[in-house]
Amino acid sequence: MYKKEFLRVKPEEVGLSSRMLWQMLQELESCGTQMHGLMIERHGKIALECWWEPYNSSMAHICHSMGKSYIGTAVGLACTQGYLGLQDRMVDLFAEEIAALNIKPSENMKKLTIEHALMMANGMSVQPPSGEELLTNYLSSDFDHEPGTKFLYNTTGSCMLGAAVEKATGRNVREYLSEEILNKIGVESDKLEWMTFHKNHIHAAPGVASSTENNLRLGMLYLQNGQWDGEQLIDPEWINKATTRRIHTEVINKESHLDNGAGYGYQLWICPEKDTFKFAGGHGQDVIMSRTNDLTISVNQSADDGGSRAENEIISKYLLRPTLPSGALAEDEEGYRLLCNYISTLKVKKRRSNCIPEDLNRWNGIYRVTSGAFHINTELRPVDDNNVYTDFYDHEDVNVKEVSIYYKNNMLELVFDDGTYRTCIHAYLDGELRPVYSKGAIPIYTWTVSTAFADAEELVVETKFLQTCFWTKLIFSETKDGKYKVQVYKERLHEDNPYIYLEAELVKTEKWTG
């Protein structure tokens, strides 16, 4: 892979004030989100890059629905190369599957095109499940609206676009997109993970994890109208259509809506600011592109709806205003020093730390689950409790059967055994977040950060897979009959119903000494 390194410059060289960026970072730190990574490119140069420890530039961070824009790029490439056309009908592309499933297409289904799916106007009132039975679920759905007339955010439709690319090109989406585009623009494959559904092996729209810079480079390709180093990789007319409002979005709650009603293009959102658009994923995984200011911003964070909204407002205030100077500013060595010093201190805040009870080692032992069920894998779950990540598990049974707890030297080691994997978590009682390799049931999640605290009655462990945005809280307690229980709170993707609650009873089978 050829990777042209970006020129790193002081912000003033591209019309950005170091003091302004310093102020912006301080506001981002206190606006209610948890920042993980931020990069700003202007005029082809990097003006700012920072990560909040333990996050770093090499990490493939979960992108959630930003993966839809990776899928959309693959469609744009296939259209550019003549494999697909915007007006190609789904019933023609998947005629064999429709016949095999004995589906009788409705008049609305017959009208459904690639373009309709790109703009989230599939013609459904409810999106069907995706996963292993993606084609069956989608093609068997009730297309109760004329395609192209009604916006409905539809992850399954995005996955079907990936299936269409694979069928038209004869290559899987990641291989095709990487060889034809991503490698050429310097996207590093070792910092790009892309999960596939079992059985059909289709690359999932929400299954992408990538680095902050990888995402930035993809955004720059769009800002440069599909051109990179003089080579036209995607038809500029396709890029123009993709980044222009193709459909109005219905705003039920304007306060929490991604685009404030500005609209949707092809697998990306149109922003309220002039000539601005964005790739967007849950919990604030954003790439914002401004033609007005020749600016690309890549963000990784862990935010609820309110935090993400606040982050967007701060970035808009500082970087998306139409009066942003285009040319170089006067040097400001003191301002640049303040900015650099502040960046050097960036760190995810401690969760919580308590004094350590003298008898904490009383928790040492091996515990067997006797009733109930729980697991520690941090999933993406919508409010209907459908766990879409089971489509990506390495194995079916993800419930913990046995837990081992061992305390020594201000550190807890917990081993969760589900019969196939033994996931080891190290939790420190000082509240510091230390990355530990902890491969679990979801293949791309391989590092955890954890913290623990305790009192006389409970042992509490908070843990997360570092590539994700979600925390899991486990509360261990002893019951009156000499048994134990664990209560598990797992954060959801959506703010209106933020937790999954699980509970199990445990029996301590033996003392464990490590």
Image (cartoon, rainbow, N blue to C red):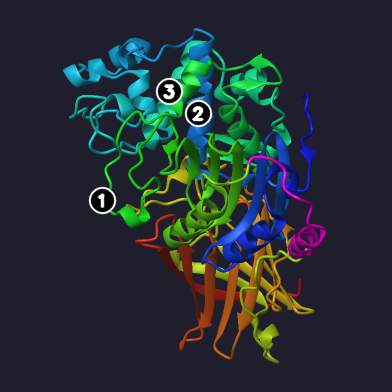
Furthest residue in direction front, as rendered: 330
On screen, residue 250 versus residue 498, left or right, reads: left
Q: Residue at x 35, y 28 (%)?
A: 246
Residue 82, horizontal then vertical, whole percent: 49, 7
Q: Which mark is residue 252?
A: 1
For the question of whether residue 466 can be seen, the reply is: no
What range is drawn magenta here? 326-342
Density class for disc 3 (Cα within 10 Å; few <14, some 14-19, many ≥20) is: few
User: Contact (CB < 8 A) between labels 3 and 1?
Assistant: no
Answer yes or no: is residue 93 visible: yes
Give the crowd class for mark 2: few <14, some 14-19, many >=20 residues within 10 Å: many
Q: Earlier in the sequence, mark 2 or mark 1?
A: 2
Instruction: Give the image quarter of residue 403.
Output: bottom right
Disc 1 marks a residue whose amino acid type is: Ile
Task: Work out whether residue 510 or residue 56 is closer to the camera in this orientation and state it.
Answer: 56
Q: Residue at x 52, y 66 (%)?
A: 31
Circle 1 sits in a helix, a strand or a loop, which is it? Answer: loop
When the figure is inspected, residue 246 is found, relative to residue 80, above or below; the finding is below
Using the image as rendered, state which of residue 43 and residue 460 is in the foreground.
43
Which quadrant holds residue 185?
top right
Label 2 element class: helix
| Sooner in the amino-acid sequence: mark 3 or mark 2 | 2
Q: Circle 3 sits on which residue?
A: 241
The structure residue drawn at horizontal position 59% and vertical position 49%, both measured from the top left corner, is 299
Please state the horizontal and vertical placement of residue 330, each as a whole percent of the image: 76, 50
Q: Nearer the viewer, mark 2 or mark 1?
A: 1
Rendered image: mark on residue 71:
2
Residue drawn at 70 percent across, 24 percent down: 183
Q: Residue 338 lies in magenta, yes or no? A: yes
